[in-house]
Image (spheres, rainbow, N blue to C red):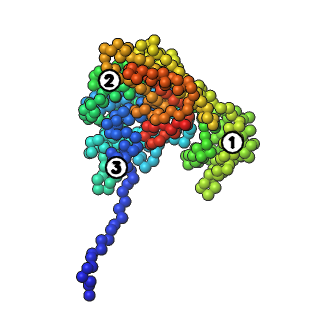
Amino acid sequence: MVARNSKAVLDRATFTTSRLMDFCSRKELIAQTGHQPAEWPLVALKELIDNSLDACEEAGISPVITVAAGDDGITITDNGPGIPSSTIDGVMDFSVKVSSREAYVSPTRGAQGNALKTILAMPFVLSGESGRVVISANGIQHSIIFSVDQIRQQPVVEIERDNSILDSGTSVFIEWLDLACSDDGIERRFLQFADDYTWINPHMTLSTDWFGKVTTVQATAPDWKKWLPTDPTSPHWYTAERLERLIAGYVTHDDDPRTVRAFVSEFKGLSGSRKQKEVLDATGLARATLTDLVTDNTIDNNIVSSLLQAMKVATKLVKAPALGVIGKAHFEQRFEAGGVEMETFGYDKGVEMVDGIPTLIEVGFGVDKQGMSGDADVPRRLITGVNWSPGIVNPFRSLGGYGNSLNSALAEARSGADEPIVMVLHMTCPRVEYTDRGKSAVVLS
């Protein structure tokens, strides 16, 4: 006999949805980039110019970069060595992060490995149907179409390759229909943000083309030097946990086990055999490989801590100016070209060393001529940057304690509340802590 109140029981199935869809939603891209869709053109600009500058610097080339925006989208072209096809293949694998810097600690522009992935997904998310990105380099044109299999709920990335007339450098085109209508102030913000790069990169020549309106800013110091992404890093910049991350990366990546000696030799101040011997003798790792530091699939924390301490003892601290000083001369030229009354121009520099981590902060400021005359309503302009990459929004929520010289410079720049101040604030540091994945806010102590 069946009870009157009995109900049918639903046999619920457990469905599997690809985590790769994280890149295919507006919500997740906002989390990945740290910015709303209205600012995504600036996000794309930032990531691609960062990549172009890094590529040129690694090749020893003074960067010449062109940014063009038109009816069909955005194109960024550089004079670097050209992105390899293998790197593009890695970018298309949305199950992994691809980065040559993520495990290293050094003053670099970006290290998270998601930049190009978010850019591939942006045109799709904005259109809702499909998006197109075209990368041209080394005589090959890679046309990448991004869409989604709505039934299986997973991204579909298709690529077509053809010959390209671009034999040198890299060109990236992002399909971005209705760009000019995407935001009321997009033209001003887009061009100003691109121009921000020239204020903190003295070696960079930039041309911008906004729907046929072309502007060029020449490098003030084409031979300017800074700490390169390929330069050896200092042991003093690492914690034991960060060194473990680097060792784990090598153990996973290397086909043949890397010796501890070879690993040690890659750090600044440890390229000589005598210094290497000091470290190896102090740790008893003279004949060891990095895989010898792994037991039961876990890196021995005590050995790594001992190794790091020995490396620090054998090397000197890196002083902040060695990271790369933008300098007063460059700021003077940019401020004068930017229409600042040079009698109001000021420059200051602050350096600090905390636990072996050098920090260099440079500040330039002045008052706009037009604003001073009262002939125009000129707003303040604030250019902020970390490791030679400008912030889309000011990343310095709190400056903390960086010495009287910096504080006095900031106080002076703020002295006239109604004055149209132009101000640049740039920080160089090998170990930067961010509060979000989009790297939009810096933690300063």
- The residue at 74%/34% (across/down) is 274
The image quarter containing residue 204 is top left
Q: Where does the image place residue 64, in percent across and percent down from the top left?
A: 43, 23
Regarding residue 13, the answer to whether it shows in the image is yes
> Who's the residue at 29% across and 29% down the image?
185
Q: Which mark is residue 209?
A: 2
Q: Residues within 10 Å of mark 3 (few under 14, many from 20)?
A: many
Q: Does residue 236 appear left or right of residue 344 in this picture?
A: right
Please provide percent x and percent y for residue 219: 45, 18
- In three-dimensional space, the C-alpha distance between marks 3 and 1, rounded to whole angstroms, equals 46 Å
Residue located at (33% from left, 68% from top): 12
Sequence-first tag of 1 and 2:
2
- Give the quadrant of residue 352: top right
Q: Give how far across and how far down residue 148 sits, in percent.
A: 31, 49
**Marking on residue 331:** none
Closer to the camera: disc 1 or disc 2? 1
Residue sitting nearer the eye, 393 or 237: 393
Q: Are marks 3 and 1 in contact (CB under 8 Å)?
A: no
**SS category of the residue bearing label 2:** strand
Q: Which residue is mark 3?
A: 155
- Residue 297 figure quarter: bottom right
**How many residues crowd around disc 1 within 10 Å: few (fewer than 14), some, or many (20 or more)?**
some
Judged from the image, the secondary structure of the residue bearing numbered disc 3 is strand
